[in-house]
Image (cartoon, rainbow, N blue to C red):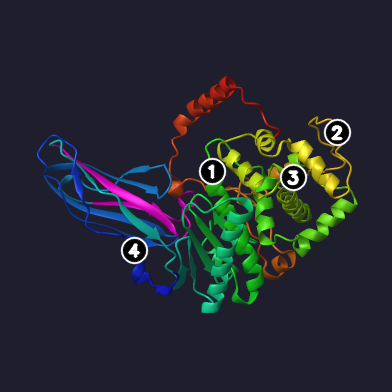
């Protein structure tokens, strides 16, 4: 059941689920540490301040704050600022002006304290939850068990239209692709382009129109109520990325880019490509200038026209798979990828073809000959038939963007209606976010983990894919 309500900055301060902590003594000495008060305060994009007042019969010499994003494993451990004594006031500040500490609106944090005194007493508070919101605006909401939509500009019918489209996108993904939502999603609709940029990383591109923060379960889009049609498509695209990420997330690797973006494009319009994608795709077919699927497995080109072709072709390939092999095969393909399969390995298990064979099947469906050198299944790429400037332009884009949030970088890229893009000065992107507030993701364990994966794969006889 959905409902409409308003969030105020006062309510934001009350989102903390409880202010009374439950304390668990872990030392052998008599419990002597008492927490008098604790809390937090946030100024969006400025700072997030945690405070604690504690007393003990012995001198308190250690106060640490632990926190993690809800749903993530990484935990940040931080020494608080305080003066040792039998009564202390401790504080830890997360500087939100530091780009490495960025976290989007809608982030949920778990946090708890650890306190130690010279008598050997150690006290840990129970985990508390806070919701980090953009308090510059008074939010209206619509929600059900699957998602919550936040918006402040536009009337109730505007919010209802976006809410309905988001739910339709979830239904289509479940019915046509076999990808059902696993965790609730938060969607924040900013009333315009400038408002949106004020909520993103300082390194966000000027043309950015929206971001899917897949690791946080958050979508952030800038939609002027006068541009609802574009907003509906952007909503569908970003929702798709979040759900597909939930379904296929694994420690071994991501989907090939053509599949990830192709499903998002397909979900925007299941019957045909949108006008801008369709025009450039049909021209590429006519001139035999389609890219290869192996090229499209990597980040898309930086050139806007080539990027639009990449999106359009990816959407057409996904439509071909669903129409030819069926929705069950597509769902099976995503299930296999969720286990960490390599590109060719997953395609062969789900569809019985590798990347090149699928590429040639698709080319035949639009009246094009096979790729040279692949008629017998050999894995090769014809550079003349499939120009791939993406690698050159990608490196330039990455050099120009510290966090690589551009559509050609390591994040999931998203395209939008070209005419609308020119009108609003915004495109849409999505990103696989880094650890929140500069969290450490246990980098020391990664090399050992990767060695174990390689040894395991060799021992099990896994074949290498073509990506």
Q: Residue at label 4?
A: 15
Span colored in magenta: 90-118
Nearer the observer: mark 2 or 1; the answer is: 2
The quadrant of the picture occupied by the C terminus is top right
Judge by depth and name the residue closer to the eye, 30 or 18.
18
3 or 2: tag closer to the N-terminus: 2
Residue 96 highlighted magenta (yes or no): yes
First of labels 2, 1 by sequence position: 1
- What residue does disc 2 label? 375
Query: What residue is disc 3 on?
Result: 390
Mark with earlier residue (3, 1): 1
Q: Secondary structure at mark 1?
A: loop
Badge number at residue 262: none
Whether residue 407 appears in this view of the structure is no
- Residue for badge 1: 249
Element under disc 4: loop
């Amino acid at each position: 059941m959905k409902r409409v309500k308003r969030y105020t900055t006062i309510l934001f301060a009350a989102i903390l689920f409880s202010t009374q902590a439950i304390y668990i003594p872990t030392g052998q000495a008599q419990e002597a540490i008492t927490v008098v008060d604790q809390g937090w305060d946030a100024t969006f994009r400025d700072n997030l301040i945690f405070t604690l007042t504690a007393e003990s019969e012995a001198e308190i010499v250690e106060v640490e704050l632990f926190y993690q994003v809800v749903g993530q494993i990484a935990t940040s451990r931080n020494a608080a600022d305080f003066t040792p004594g039998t009564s202390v006031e401790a504080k830890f500040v997360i500087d939100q002006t530091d780009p490495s500490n960025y976290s989007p609106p809608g982030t949920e944090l778990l946090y708890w304290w650890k306190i130690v005194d010279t008598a050997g007493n150690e006290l840990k508070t129970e985990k508390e939850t806070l919701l980090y919101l953009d308090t510059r605006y008074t939010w209206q909401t619509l929600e059900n068990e699957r998602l919550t939509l936040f918006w402040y500009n536009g009337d109730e019918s505007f919010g209802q239209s976006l809410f309905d489209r988001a739910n339709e996108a979830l239904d289509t993904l479940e019915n046509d692709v076999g990808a059902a939502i696993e965790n609730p999603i938060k969607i924040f609709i900013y009333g315009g382009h400038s408002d949106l940029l004020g909520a993103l990383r300082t390194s966000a591109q000027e043309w950015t129109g929206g971001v899917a923060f897949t690791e946080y379960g958050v979508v952030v889009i800038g939609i002027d109520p006068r541009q609802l049609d574009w907003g509906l498509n952007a909503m569908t695209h970003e929702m798709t990325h979040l759900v597909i990420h939930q379904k296929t997330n694994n420690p071994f690797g991501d989907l090939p880019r053509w599949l990830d973006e192709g499903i998002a494009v397909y979900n925007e319009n299941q019957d045909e490509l949108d006008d801008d994608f369709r025009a450039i795709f049909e021209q590429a077919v006519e001139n035999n200038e389609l890219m290869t699927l192996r090229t499209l497995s990597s980040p898309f080109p930086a050139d806007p026209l080539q990027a639009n072709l990449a999106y359009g072709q990816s959407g057409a390939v996904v439509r071909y798979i669903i129409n030819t092999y069926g929705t069950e095969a597509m769902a099976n393909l995503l299930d296999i990828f969720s286990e960490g399969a390599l590109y060719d390995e997953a395609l062969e298990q789900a569809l019985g073809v590798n990347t090149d064979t699928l590429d040639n099947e698709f080319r035949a469906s639009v009246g094009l000959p096979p790729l040279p050198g692949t008629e017998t299944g050999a894995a090769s790429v014809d550079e003349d038939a499939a120009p791939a400037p993406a690698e050159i332009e990608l490196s330039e884009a990455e050099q120009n963007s510290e966090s690589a949030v551009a559509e050609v970088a390591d994040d999931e890229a998203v395209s939008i209606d070209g005419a609308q893009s020119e009108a609003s000065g915004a495109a849409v992107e999505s990103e696989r976010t880094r650890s929140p507030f500069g969290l450490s993701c246990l980098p020391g364990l990664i090399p050992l983990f990767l060695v174990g994966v390689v040894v395991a794969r060799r021992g099990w006889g896994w074949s290498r894919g073509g990506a």
